[in-house]
Amino acid sequence: MDEPSHPAEFPVGESFARTLTEATQSLVCVLDREGCILLFNEACERATGFRRHELIGRDARDFVIPPEEREAFGEFLEYVWTTGTPAPQVGHWLSKDGGRRLIAWSNKPMAGTDGMPESLVTTGIDLTDRQAREDDDALEGDPSAKLAQVSRLATEQRALRRVATLVASEVSPERVFMAVSEECARVLHVNASIVVRYEGDAATIVGRHNRDSIDVFRVGERLPPEAHSAIARVLKSGAPARVDDWGGLTGEMADTIFRIGYRSTAAVPIVVAGALWGAVAIASEDPLPADSEDRLVAFCELASLAVASAQARADLIASRARLVRAGDDQRRRLERNLHDGAQQRFVSVVLKLRLARARLTSHPEATAELLEDAARELDTGLRELREIARGLHPAILGEQGLMRALEALAEGLPVAVDIDADPERLPEHIEATAYYIVAEALTNVAKHAAATRARVSVLRDGAVLRCEVSDDGCGGADTSGGTGILGLRDRAEAAGGTLVLASPPGRGTVVTAVLPVTD
């Protein structure tokens, strides 16, 4: 039997879209007009046990659609391509081990270059393992229950898309937090929702929405660290938490919640770069459903992406500003060195040569001495120019390679340096980046570390060059204290690499840069 043709995997495009697709806990699958799978995200892999390479280009009906639902799946596709409109669905997916997952799908056709729909973007929620769901049997057989569930899920998906659009548009995090709060309150039918950022043992409100127009829990307000609150429990455990009934609790927050008539609250953590950043919390005058925390998770993921995106933009802006300042500082330093050093030497040489020419006939005995002085000044000026040129781009680096250049660099330092470097030549820009990172790191060792010895390791590891500079000094390097570490990180990142600093007080400093070896 001939193997089916494999269309190219769906092109995600923007890096944000890829991050959002893979980071979300929602199932994301893209289909072509024939029902072949073009994209299958990590959440789909976890739900089914299939790996994407097993399914990309294959008909979904041959793998994940149960036999008894294949006809309905085909009718669904025909409806979408004929009408060009979404058609929310509830159905089953087969897992690789033969099990079944109950999935609620929201979908939207995507137009091609000719304006006609060419692929279908579907996002789903796995309902199989939802807790405290009393309508399981109804969802299996009752069409009205299915429609109600689909309507609820479609509402959630629309709300998530609205927030995701804001994140993708790179609006301010504050605007995203307000949108998250509003959408959470609307979708979960609660009275109020807030987004908080943890600062020490307290939480500061950075976004809010209140359907009752009650002027409490305002943006910028710091919430008291009451241990029994859902927000405080999230801070302590990093896991979702809830308070089902505030009626029997005491404290400042309990008094406020009781006074405005709210009964139950729930909170879910916002995690950024693996660290707890804050939480999304909701409050209701009625008991919260058991699945409230599950439904908040997707909104927290979008809030975390907004924070990460904003932080990345801020870091990029700061990095660019540092690079501009560093360039300006280097130009001013070069101008100062030329003016105060070599330029003055050459001016002196010119004056002495003119004086020698003027005295050549009247005082011939003094001419030789003037010429000798001019030659000495000229030699000194040339040496100073070589030193300046070495600081810009040492000739030995281009002529003899990175290893020899590092050895020459170490010879002029007041600290003993052990060097372990590969002798092979690398692309010029990689050698230059590695050289200046090591040079700046060793300069910091000599100036700030109070070290007796340093070690340099510059070794290739597959497709990357790993550069490490360590010392036995006092440690405690501070990136805000003028040590140049931020400049090193900027230089490494400009080359597509990374740089990290480990500097525990009293235990020396280790600077590690990893640079991709590319042409």
Image (tube, rainbow, N blue to C red):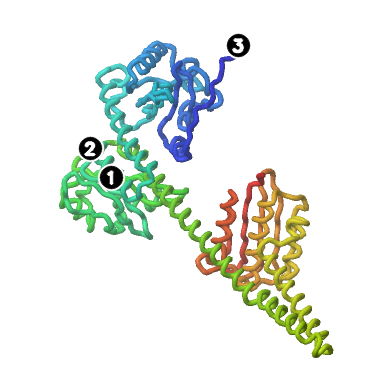
Give the CA distance from mark 3 to mark 2: 53 Å
Secondary structure beneath label 1: helix
Q: Image quadrant of residue 255?
A: bottom left
Secondary structure beneath label 2: loop
Mark 3 against mark 1, which lies toward the viewer?
Answer: 3
Q: At which x and y percent is residue 287? A: 22, 39
Mark 2 against mark 1, which lies toward the viewer?
Answer: 1
Would you place residue 21 above or below residue 444 in this image? above
Q: Is residue 144 left or right of residue 334?
A: left
Dot 3 or dot 2, earlier in sequence: 3
Which amino acid type is shown beneath numbered disc 3? Asp
Dot 3 or dot 1, earlier in sequence: 3
Q: At which x and y percent is residue 506? A: 59, 69
Q: Which residue is mark 1?
A: 181
Q: At which x and y percent is residue 285? A: 18, 43
Mark 3 against mark 2, which lies toward the viewer?
Answer: 3
Q: Which residue is mark 3?
A: 2
Give the CA distance from mark 3 to mark 1: 53 Å
Would you place residue 333 above or below residue 267 in this image? below
Q: Is residue 24 visible?
A: yes
Would you place residue 509 above or below residue 516 in this image? below
Q: Determine the residue located farthest toward the top in the rendered image.
A: 1
Q: Which residue is mark 2?
A: 189
Dot 2 or dot 1, earlier in sequence: 1
Secondary structure beneath label 3: loop
**Structural crowding at the residue carrying mark 2, measured as other residues with C-alpha within 10 Å and reported as few (<14), some (14–19) or many (≥20):** some
Which amino acid type is shown beneath numbered disc 1? Ser
